[in-house]
Image (cartoon, helix red, strand yellow):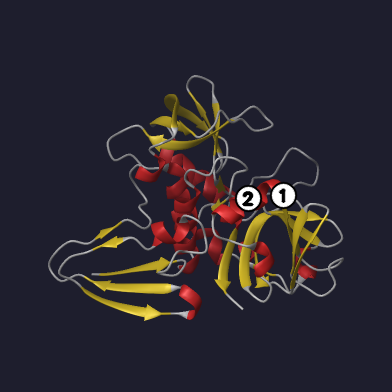
Amino acid sequence: MKISVWCVGRLSPPKVAGVGRVACGVIFAAIQCRFDWLAWGLILLDVRLCCLAVLLVAVPVSGTARACDGLGEGPSGVVSKVFDGNTMELDSGIVVRLSGAEAPHPAGARAGSVAEPLADAARAALAKLVLNQSVRLGLDTEETDRYGHVEAQVFIDAPGGAWIEQAMIAAGMARAVVPVRNHACIGELIAAELAARANGLGIWADPYYSVRDAADPAALAGRTGHYELIEGEVVGTGEARNRLYLDFGRVWKDDVTATIDQKARGLFTAAGIDPLSLKGSRVRIRGWVESRQGPLIELDSPEQIEVLSSK
C-alpha cells in the first residue's frame, strides 16, 4: 500500500498561517519513510506501510475535523434540496451556503450568463453527499450572504459523519475560499485543495481553473469578479494612503497587484508575514479579481498568500 501526502510550508514555522501544521501532520509506527525534498519547502512523503497502521491527519475527507470543533452550534435538519455545488435547503426552509468552499457556478438568471465548467458535476457531488441526509451546521459567526442564505460549515449529523466543505474540496469539486471573517477551518480546507490540485482531481484537470501566471495580466482581463489563484514573483512592494502594495510587474497600472489595508496588516504581522519584505519572493495569492488599473486582489487575511520561495 502506498500513500502520498503533499505538505505545504517548511518544517520550520510555516509561512502560511495554519496550513503547514495541518498538512504535514503524520503519526506513524513501524514504517519506512522516504522524504523527497522538492523546491522551497514542498515535501512529498512517500510512505510504505510495513505491518502497523498509519494515521494521516493531514486531509481527512470524512469525519468531523477536530480543528472545527470550536464552531458555534447552528440549526440542524434534513437536506431536502440541492440547488448547485454551493447551496442546499433544509426541510425547515433554511437555505445554507457552504462556507470556505467555492464550487463551479451554474448559469445565472441574467441574460448571457453561462455555467462554469463542471457545474453540473459539482451539484451532483454535493447531492450525493447531503441529499436526504441529516446535517448540522457549524457557525463561526452569525453569517448570511447577500441573499439571506446561512453561511456555515456543514457536517453529516452522525458518528464519523463527513465534513462537507472538506469532502467537496478534497474531491476537486470546489476551491478553498478564504472568508472575510470566518477563518476557523480555512487551513484544513486549503490543505485539502493542495492535495486535490496536485493530483489533478475534478476542476484541477480543467484549464479554466488553473493557477494564473502573474506575469501574464492579459490572461486575467476577462476574469474580473472571479475567484482566482495567481502565482508569480513580487517585483516591488510599497505603502501609500494607508495601504500596502505588492506589485507583480514593473508597470503597476497594467500589471497584477495585491493590496493590504491597515486593519488587515495586523493579521499578517501576527502570522509572522511582513508583506513589505516579500520583494523578490515567489508567492501564490487567492481572492476575487477586481479591475483597478490592471488586475487587483485585496488580501484581507494571511491565509490568502502562500510564500513559495524567498528572495
The three-letter code of the residue at mark 2 reads Gly
Query: In the rendered view, does 210 fall on the left or right side of 195?
Result: right
Q: Indicate whether 35 appears above or below 17.
A: below
x and y, in percent, of residue 215 in the image: 73, 74
Q: Residue at x 59, y 31 (%)?
A: 143
Q: How many marks?
A: 2
Q: Residue at x 75, y 73 (%)?
A: 216
Q: Are marks 1 and 2 in contact (CB under 8 Å)?
A: yes
Depth check: give the residue in front, 309 or 218: 309
Residue 63 seen in this snapshot? yes
x and y, in percent, of residue 78 in the image: 42, 26
Check residue 266 in the rendering and tell me which mark sits there, or answer none. Answer: 2
x and y, in percent, of residue 286 in the image: 63, 58
Label 2: which secondary element: helix
The residue identified by callout 1 is 262
Depth check: give the residue in front, 49 or 240: 240
The three-letter code of the residue at mark 1 reads Gln
